Image (tube, rainbow, N blue to C red):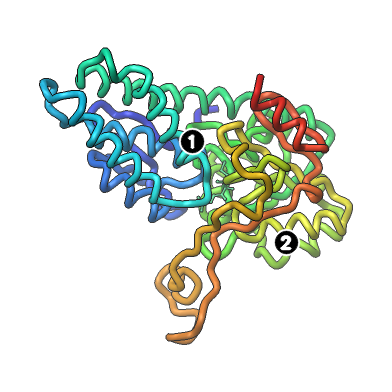
Amino acid sequence: MSRLKTIEWAGNAVRIVDQTCLPAKLCYEDITTVEVMFEAIRALRVRGAPAIGIAAGFGMYLAVREFPETGSVRDFLTLFEKNIDYLAGARPTAVNLSWALQRVKTRIAGLAEKETSASLKRAVFDEAQAMLEEDRASGRAIGEHGFGLLKDCETILTHCNAGGLATAEFGTALAPVYVAAERNKKLHVYSDETRPLLQGSRITAFELKAAGIPVTVLCDNAAASLLRKKTVDAVIVGADRIASNGDVANKIGTYGLALAARAAQVPFYVAAPLSTFDPSLATGNEIPIEERDDAEVTCGFGRRTAPEGVDVYNPAFDVTPHDLVTALITEKGVLRPPYGEAIRKALQG
Ligand code: MRU
């Protein structure tokens, strides 16, 4: 099954699928400067926690690639640090962004003393490329573990987009669906529309349809009654950040879905690579939640749907407490409660 390349190095630029064009058009954007990369992340042209991390890694290469080959390592490091701080401010919730920047930083810190600025530049590029390839492998492994968990399911429900377009290639929540399809098992996916930016209907439905997987789109407010009817075997979503105790930040609406799944006694799974875990936070209460522009709610996609000047509450994410999560699916296997211990072990080994 050939999948879209969400993000890749295209010789002289970072090529992304511009996700704001979907589903009407499949368009690509070639990004050549760190400023445009910052804007692409902020405007959700590239989005989804793992894809944002990879974009930040390549963004760092764009930031330093014009630095003169003969320039001093000290000047290189000044430019490097400035851009680490700059990109870290693009979006606050998905920890993959700061995780990726920290990885590039650690790689450079391990080299700086003895290298030239030319070889440091190369190292930034290699680290970004390595993160992309590792994410591809993580997606596949999550898919295998998730398939084991879902093998008796016929129908699943997901929220937002945690598919190939949110990652390097394979996805997290949708990865088990793709593995199932490779093995001739077609899971039927219900995809919440996901207000206000409609990642579920614009992006999840787009990529599943392109892959020939049956998908049904529903308004977010239809999910609870669908679950109550017992027509869904499991809910599976991605994550933007998972705290040490297993609390999960994901797209706004995930918490409500988890409550509805619990009420209907439907298992609620979260699929995420270890790069989405934040061991520095004890609980989900500490996760920074991005608040986005009022216009996304009042005038989404160019049509006014609320009166001018009305007050708006528009958090992009919410936190689902760990006790509503049946299991966490990672590239290292399926983690079960109690999560504190399971997460610590997975991150160690
Ligand atoms: O605002 P978005 O579209 O970047 O939000 C994305 C999500 O909430 C995804 O579920 C999450 O990043 C996991 S992607 C594998």
Please tell me which residue is depicted at 48% across the width and 76% down the height of the picture. Answer: 298
Q: Residues within 10 Å of mark 1 (few under 14, many from 20)?
A: many
Please tell me which residue is depicted at 60% across the width and 32% down the height of the picture. Answer: 273
Please tell me which residue is depicted at 45% across the width and 34% down the height of the picture. Answer: 100
Among numbered discs 2 and 1, the one appearing first in the sequence:
1
The residue labelled by disc 1 is 99
Label 1 sits on what residue type?
A: Trp
Label 2 sits on what residue type?
A: Gly
Which x, y percent locates residue 193? 60, 59
Quadrant containing the N terminus is: top right
Q: Respond yes or no on whether mark 1 lies under 8 Å from ligand 1.
A: no
The quarter holding residue 6 reads top left
In the visual, does 204 lie left or right of 32?
A: right
Q: Nearer the viewer, residue 61 or 285?
A: 285
Local secondary structure at mark 1 = helix
Residue 52 visible within the image: yes
Local secondary structure at mark 2 = helix
Which x, y percent locates residue 111? 33, 17
